[in-house]
Image (cartoon, rainbow, N blue to C red):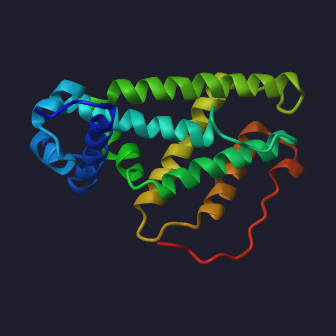
Amino acid sequence: MTVSSPATRERLLAAAQDELIEGQGHIEMQAVARRAQASVGLAYHHFGSKAGLIAAVVEGFYELLDQAAFSGAKLPTADWAGREKARIGAYVAFHYQHPFAPLVIGPLSRAAEVLDVETAFTARQLAAGARMLEAAQRDGIVGTDIDPHLTIALMIGGIRQALIGALTAARRPDPADLTDDIWAFMAAALRLPAEASVKSKPTRRSRR
């Protein structure tokens, strides 16, 4: 008899991610179980359904993203603008390096199976971003003439669309160039002083 364990669950999640990538967002429980060297019964035991398994894979992706660029990120603290630009750099780098990213921000983001996961993560981003802007306003870094909630919603939407374009392009822009471009957009939206929004862009070779 196969014994269920946390290790089995992690194998199933890894196998499901690989199957989703290969299947462009589609999986079959039998194929996942076979790749994970586990029984289909254990897959259903851990996740309840195929939809539950897909949602768990996406939730795991967002947990890693949170560690890389948000609550778990180790970013410079001396300068607000420098820290937030570094956050954008970490966000871009994570998506460039994670093989599951094009699916998560693309086709899977519209799938019914992951709607609750997407909604919860976006809500956390919006709330944390609004608090960040409100703190920056209190510190005199960002002007009080902008609405933090509206502004962060526009910024998050714009960054997501920029990433979708970058990840699906025939030639991906250099991640440092993309970070510079996104930060310039953010700095303009926040009406930061010129010295906070200057870009440093040495010539770089585009990467595929």
Residue 149 position, x and y percent, is 64, 23
Residue 11 position, x and y percent, is 29, 43
Q: Nearer the viewer, residue 59 or 170?
A: 59
Please say if 208 is above or below 40.
below
For the point 75% across and 45% down, which residue is it?
187
Of the 4 image quadrants, the one containing the N terminus is top left
Residue 8 picture quarter: top left
For the point 33% across and 38% down, which residue is it?
57
Residue 28 picture quarter: top left
Q: Nearer the viewer, residue 44 or 194?
A: 44
Residue 193 position, x and y percent, is 88, 44
- The answer to whether one can see residue 40 in this image is yes
The answer to whether 79 appears left or right of 4 in the picture is right
For the point 43% across and 40% down, which residue is it?
61
**Number of marks present in the image shown:** 0
Q: Nearer the viewer, residue 14 or 19?
A: 14
The answer to whether 113 appears left or right of 104 in the picture is left
Residue 15 position, x and y percent, is 26, 47
- The answer to whether one can see residue 147 in this image is no
